[in-house]
Image (tube, grey):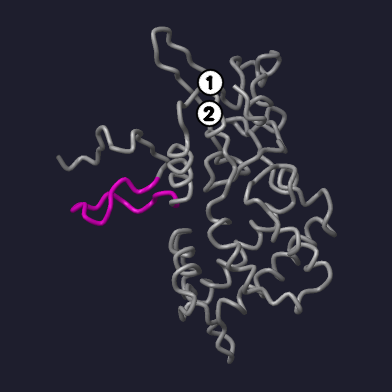
Amino acid sequence: AYIPHIKNPERGFVSSANQEPTDSSYPYYLGSSYGSFTRPARINERLIEMKDISPDDMRRLQIDTLDLKARAILPGLSILMEEQKLTPAEKAAFKKIKLWNFKFLAELIEPTIFEYWWRELANIIWSDELEHPDGQLNQPGTNVTLDLIINKPDSPYFDIKTTEEKESLKELTLLSFKAAIQKLTERFGSMDESWTWGKARGTDINHLARIPGLNRKNLETNGNSGIVNATSLTFGPSWRMIVALGPELKAWGIYPGGQSGNPGSKFYDNMIDDWAAGKY
């Protein structure tokens, strides 16, 4: 009875995306290394919207690139931003991200700006809190940081302990954005095509033995960790599958590799490009 389960829910579907499987009423400890709420929440959001679901609907769902994290915090951070304190280059980057649709598409610059900004914001919130003689402690998970930004804007965690001033989320918004643009500029130069998500992040499919000549590098992929299409630099969906149940069973699948283990075969990596493009 205490094995987490769900049977015939009223909403008409069951979904899972590495999230915590129980709520606070569950009596036993199951662990803590779960994904953020963003992927399962987006999956549920899309499924609730769908009617007469087709295999193509599920294909589009599996390669969905909208980031709920960005959608949740970017409008509020944009209001807090002190634009008059930005340099011309920073203003140009901020103008782009204010108009962004929150989708992590390979051809867009905005996802790169947001991802660097998010990292800098999380670091500036937590780094002074987590200093330890034995080294920096791990930051809280994404869910905790999002809750702090959205629901606790006056939290003392926003104050930087090493300064005499009392900082708030407003000051950290500006400082973290400036730091993000500085890092992007140092790495890629002025904002141009090199800032696009596919080029700035990319995805590598590494050979199991890490033999360089047998890898596929710098795939320009959509998606990100915490998104339904959970690609990253070196990991991502290793198997996408859709099954249509009915009198005649139909199924589609794709994985980032090929059917042959022989590097000299045309089937060694013949499915990688289709996988990166979201095809089956």
Image location (x, y in percent) of residue 211: 66, 31
Image location (x, y in percent) of residue 272: 65, 26
166 or 88: nearer the eye? 88
The relative height of residue 215 versus residue 149 in the rendered view (above or below) is: above
176 or 38: nearer the eye? 38
Q: Which residue is mark 1?
A: 253
* Residue 245 left/right relative to 194: left
Mark with earlier residue (2, 1):
2
3D distance between C-alphas at marks 2 and 1: 15 Å
| Residue type (three-letter) at the residue carrying disc 2 | Asp
Question: What residue is rendered at 55% in x and 41% in y?
Answer: 230
Task: Tell me, for residue 178, which label it has, or none.
Answer: none
The relative height of residue 12 versus residue 246 in the rendered view (above or below) is: below
Q: Which residue is mark 2?
A: 57
Front: mark 2 or 1: 2
What secondary structure is marked by label 1? Answer: strand
Region of the chain picked out in magenta, as a range:
19-36
Q: Residues within 10 Å of mark 2 (few under 14, many from 20)?
A: some
Image location (x, y in percent) of residue 55: 51, 22
| Residue type (three-letter) at the residue carrying disc 1 | Gly
Question: What residue is rendered at 58% in x and 92% in y?
Answer: 164
Which quadrant of the rendered structure holds the C terminus? top right
| Identity of the residue furthest to the top in this view | 248
